Image (cartoon, rainbow, N blue to C red):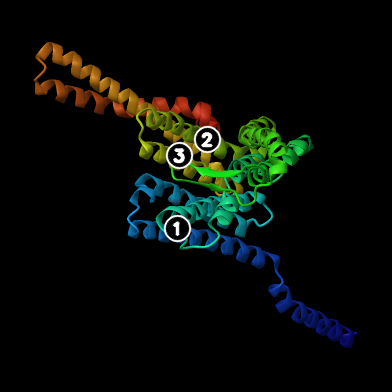
Amino acid sequence: MLEGGDAGGDLGAARIMAIGPDARAADPGRWTAGLAWLLWVLTQSGLAAVLWLDHLLRQAGRSELTIRAHELLYVAAVVGMATVGAVLASRRPRHPVGWLMLALGLSVTVDGLTDGYARYGLLASPGAVPAVGHVRALGDTFALWPACIGFILLLTPTGSLPSPRWRWWAGIAAVAPLLWKAATVLGIATVEFPPFYSFRNPYFVPALASPAMAVALPAVLITLLSVVAGGASLVVRFRRARGLERQQLRWVASAAVVAAVGIPVAMAGISIDSAAVVGVAVLGSAAVLCLAIAAAILRYRLYDLDRIISRTIAYGLLTLVLGSSYAGVVLALGQLLGRDSTLAVAGATLAAAALFQPARHRIQALVDRRFNRRRHDAAQTI
């Protein structure tokens, strides 16, 4: 019996030794993490190449073709998107959202790189670099941007579709940008990027011009609609979700509310023709959504959200109440004592200080009743 036990132990040890190094070498987690960070490095290298081409344009005296100051915000957005995607893909390799973020960041980088290449090769130094038309015609990746965003929203936070009924839409949304890209590469005679450059498309096939134009319009509409459908899928998920998934979606929903503030800011920037304001609004909204999606997928302290929401709303309302009270007291005492009286300011300050604690407790209780019910119920029980 003892020999049998020793033999069994030796066999088990031999198996462990046999599979240990090989299993670690073939661990899919290591390969996927390495691939994720490799894509991140490619994205950062592409951005570095974009900045180098921008430097060459400045050296050639074509400053009107270079990156404007506000466009550096989009570079920062690409860096953030790729970084969040790499973290998600390395930690949750089976979750597609991290890979989609990496694909989005890399596609934006490729578009910017090939655009800078075309500006330098066509305008700043014609003939200095080869195959400009081929590179730019294939490097226009705008068709992939809304598709990636739509699928990020569609697959957040679980990594799967909301239900099997969404499979038909997912298939259409995946094929549409590919058809759009094929139509633009094969069916358009001239590649234009006004007001900078225009050149003959080297891949244009005259016989495919009419079919390509018939396909391009529905494909671009479906691709753009995929973003709206992705947002609608989050609403459907939230209504059906329970437990952990609902907590994950509350992070995303809260971030979406905050990011929605960027819409009127961006519209204001457009109305005053301020590209910097538009860039800040877009970058801020994208950053908030990316971080919220990452936190939801990684499930990092999801259950602190109730406390964060309740405290944010409570102190926001408290600031509004105290500010209104202070202004009202100053105006009232100013009418009685004179507008230049320091007593009015002193009295308003004392009134606001006296009101602070009672107002804070009262507002916090009201907010907890709605947004932090567990704390409210515990306080009532005590």
Q: Amino acid at mark 1?
A: Pro
User: Which of the pair 35/183 is nearer the observer?
Assistant: 183
Callout in the foreground (3, 2)? 3
Q: Quick one: label 2 or label 1, which is nearer the N terminus? A: 1
Q: Report crowding for label 3: few under 14, some 14 to 19, many 20 or more residues within 10 A (C-alpha).
A: some
* Quarter containing the N terminus: bottom right
Q: Quick one: label 1 or label 3, which is nearer the N terminus? A: 1
Q: Is residue 379 left or right of residue 220?
A: left
Which numbered disc covers residue 256? Answer: 2
Residue 73: % across, % down: 41, 47
| 3D distance between C-alphas at marks 3 and 2 | 13 Å
Residue 12: % across, % down: 81, 79
Q: Residue at x 64, y 51 (%)?
A: 203
Q: Quick one: label 3 or label 2, which is nearer the N terminus? A: 2
Q: Tell me the residue that label 3 is attached to.
A: 282
Q: Residue at x 66, y 50 (%)?
A: 96
Circles 3 and 2: CB atoms closer than 8 Å: no
| 3D distance between C-alphas at marks 2 and 1 | 45 Å
Element type where label 2 sits in the image: helix
Q: Report crowding for label 2: few under 14, some 14 to 19, many 20 or more residues within 10 A (C-alpha).
A: some
